[in-house]
Image: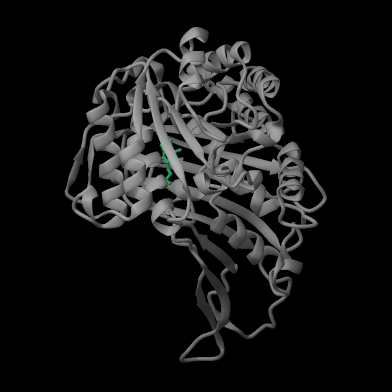
Amino acid sequence: MAADRTTLLILGASGDLTSRLLLPGIATLLRAQPKRSLEIVGADLRDLGQDEWRSRVQTAMAAAHGEGDAGELGATAQHVVDTTRYVAGDATDPKALRALLESVDCDRLVLYFALPPHVSRMVCEALAEVGAPDGAILAIEKPFGSSLDDARELNALVQRIVPEDQIFRIDHFLGLYTVLNLLGMRFANRILSPLWDRDSIAKVEILYDETVALEGRAGYYDTAGALRDMIQSHLLQVLALVAIEPPASIDARDLRDAIGQVLRAARVVDPATDARRARYTAGAIGDREVPDYTGEDGVDASRGTETLAEVTVHVDNQRWAGVPFVLRSGKAMGHIRKQAVIHFREPAYVPRGFGGRNSADRLVLDFRPDSFAIHLTTNGKGDPFTLEQSVLRGELGGGQLEPYGEVLASILDGDPRLAVRADAAEECWRIVEPVLRAWKRDEVPLAEYRAGGVGPRGWRSNGEAQD
Ligand code: BG6
């Protein structure tokens, strides 16, 4: 038996996440790293049938390889298509789960939970009863749990099954390049590093405005909303990397210790005033008509689900005391904006006699593709007596892999650096829960914004006009 025979067993294989993100991620990984040996087994309650499953795997491989059909795939991708199989069954039932696990013959098993949190939990309960094969890795999709208590219980449960270093709580925003680019920007130069604190920085914004709307995901999204979907998981992780103290190294332990330290210091001071929510109404994004959110199939308007959330977080430590971190994410916005904006304080003193606009400097870090722009106040081009902003731009490295390809590569390599550790998953719930409670009590109105616009009337961000 070859020492590296790995099987990726996807639970929830008939779902949207598997076809939309996971299979394409695996396909790009195998294209970039064809020496990997992998078997994929799909499993789900719904009986997809072998042919349909194989065709989904083949489509993903063909798309990544830029080929029309699997006959033209590379040997590795072809092998994956040839050997893949699908098992219909209920993984929450210990008997069925045992049979499923026994049907897999490999050296190393990765169990990928592409399931909603409550189902993941039921499968983990069954797995705790049945026992996981030696060395098995559990990869669990976000959201990890559905509340702080739930995440704590789920952590205790999964840690009974395998040790923490075999648990990969997935956050695909923690792509290797983005994480390394943020750390390099912070620590690898003498310009920004000394300025990275409350003395020089007035405010940080972490923004993730998407032009996509619901995309048929009401079953999940309408019970989650933007705060849980994007801020509880992804944006708080980005905040942690922006605000992190210098880790001793970029290995998994140092990095995750430092991330945990920032998250433990983070809180929403007043959930009734430091968080806002809104929901989109009908509109158009380019030439795409978007229906009112409440008119989408599967949406229950009475749930009051927000599609845009903004939360101001403070990090209570010496470096960041008093600096607001504004986290915002919205769907069906007019423009994509995926960036962190570091707003520097105004200079303490500018000699009298300069005219023009002396705006505060800022660093904009764009995500995927990663790049940066430094907006710096300098002398006006035509007239050195005036001041204006010059922009210095730079590209940052990107990977060959889709975010899910990176996530899977780190799982297959057993490198938990990019996975969310148990304490971090709990902290993220702890930070947002006061806001969720305030919203449940209706202490914060649910505003509206037109799909394709810039957000609700009256919300201000960087002086942009709002509609
Ligand atoms: C997912 C959210 O985790 O991240 C989606 O569930 C969101 O709602 C997506 O659209 C954004 O990530 P990306 O990589 O598609 O920009």
Name the residue nearer the viewer: 441 or 190.
Answer: 190
Q: Where is residue 121, by image quadrant?
A: top right
Question: Is 110 positioned to the left or the right of 270 in the image?
Answer: left
Question: Residue at point 49% right, 49% down?
Answer: 207
Number of marks in the rendered image: 0
- Whether residue 464 is visible to the viewer of this picture, yes or no, is yes
Question: Is 72 positioned to the left or the right of 440 in the image?
Answer: left
- Residue positioned most to the front: 1
Q: Position of residue 115 (x, y in %)?
A: 45, 24
Query: Is 139 located above or below residue 90 in the figure?
Result: below
Name the residue nearer the viewer: 122 or 260.
Answer: 122
Q: Quadrant of the C terminus?
A: top left
Q: Where is residue 387, by image quadrant?
A: bottom right
Query: Is 122 located above or below residue 137 in the figure?
Result: above
Ligand 1 shows up in the quarter that is top left
- Whether residue 448 is visible to the viewer of this picture, yes or no, is no
Name the residue nearer the viewer: 194 or 97.
Answer: 97
Question: Residue at point 41% right, 52% down?
Answer: 30
Question: Residue at point 75% right, 46% down?
Answer: 253
Q: Position of residue 465 (x, y in %)?
A: 38, 53
Q: Position of residue 184 (x, y in %)?
A: 65, 65
Question: Is 287 positioned to the left or the right of 229 in the image?
Answer: left
Query: Is 238 located above or below residue 6 in the figure?
Result: below
